[in-house]
Image: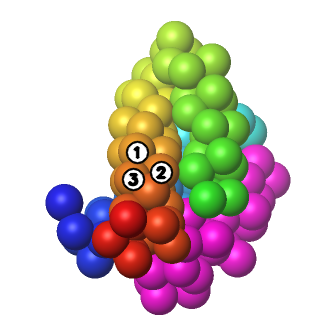
């Protein structure tokens, strides 16, 4: 896969993960009725948006590690009843997609690979 394709996959996964976090904790299945402050878990992802959209390698590197936190939360909450469990599984899928695409993007754009060594 090309670096451009991996960057686009990362962009879609990142934006979907941000939207999921806000909608999940804000309206669809919050911890408390009326919304939850837990929707602020999307805030650490926001600085990565422009870097990922521009295909920056450094952003892919640190975002791959950050995505593991969302994977962990999704796995821990996957057994919750109702919509929360469903959203947690979606979060796991998005976090895995984000991790794989950012890792492969960082690898594909490594300076040694760009020179053709």
Question: What separation in Å lies between label 2 and label 3 (alpha carbons)?
Answer: 4 Å
Quadrant position of residue 42: bottom right
Question: What separation in Å lies between label 1 and label 3 (alpha carbons)?
Answer: 6 Å
Numbered mark located on residue 103 in the image: 2
What x and y, as percent, mark residue 92?
46, 33
Asked if residue 83 is positioned above or below residue 38 in the image, the reply reads: above
Q: Quadrant of the C terminus?
A: bottom left
What x and y, as percent, mark residue 109?
43, 70
Comparing marks 1 and 3, which lies closer to the viewer? 3
Q: Residues within 10 Å of mark 3 (few under 14, many from 20)?
A: many
Q: Residue farthest to the left?
A: 1
Residue range of the region highlighted in magenta in the rendering:
33-60
Q: Are marks 2 and 1 in contact (CB under 8 Å)?
A: yes
Q: Which residue is mark 1?
A: 100
| 40 within the magenta span | yes
Helix, strand or loop status at disc 2? helix
Q: Are marks 2 and 3 in contact (CB under 8 Å)?
A: yes
Can residue 12 be seen by looking at this rendering?
no
Numbered mark located on residue 45 in the image: none
Q: Nearer the viewer, residue 109 or 29?
A: 109
What x and y, as percent, mark residue 104?
39, 53
- Relative to 88, is 37 on the left or the right? right
Q: Residue at x 45, y 57 (%)?
A: 107
Q: Are marks 1 and 3 in contact (CB under 8 Å)?
A: yes
- Relative to 82, is 50 on the left or the right? right
Helix, strand or loop status at disc 1? helix
Q: Nearer the viewer, residue 114 or 24?
A: 114
Helix, strand or loop status at disc 3? helix
Q: Quadrant of the N terminus?
A: bottom left
Q: Which residue is mark 3?
A: 104
């Amino acid at each position: 896969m090309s670096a451009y394709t991996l960057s686009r996959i990362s962009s879609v996964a990142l934006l979907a993960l941000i939207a999921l976090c806000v909608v999940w904790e804000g309206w669809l299945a919050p911890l408390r009725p009326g919304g939850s402050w837990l929707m602020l878990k999307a805030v650490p992802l926001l600085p990565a948006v422009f870097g990922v959209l521009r295909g920056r390698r450094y952003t892919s590197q640190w975002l791959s590690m950050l995505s593991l936190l969302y994977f962990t939360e999704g796995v821990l909450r996957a057994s919750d009843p109702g919509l929360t469990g469903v959203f947690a599984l979606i979060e796991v899928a998005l976090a895995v997609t984000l991790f794989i695409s950012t890792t492969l993007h960082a690898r594909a754009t490594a300076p040694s690979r760009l020179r053709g060594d």
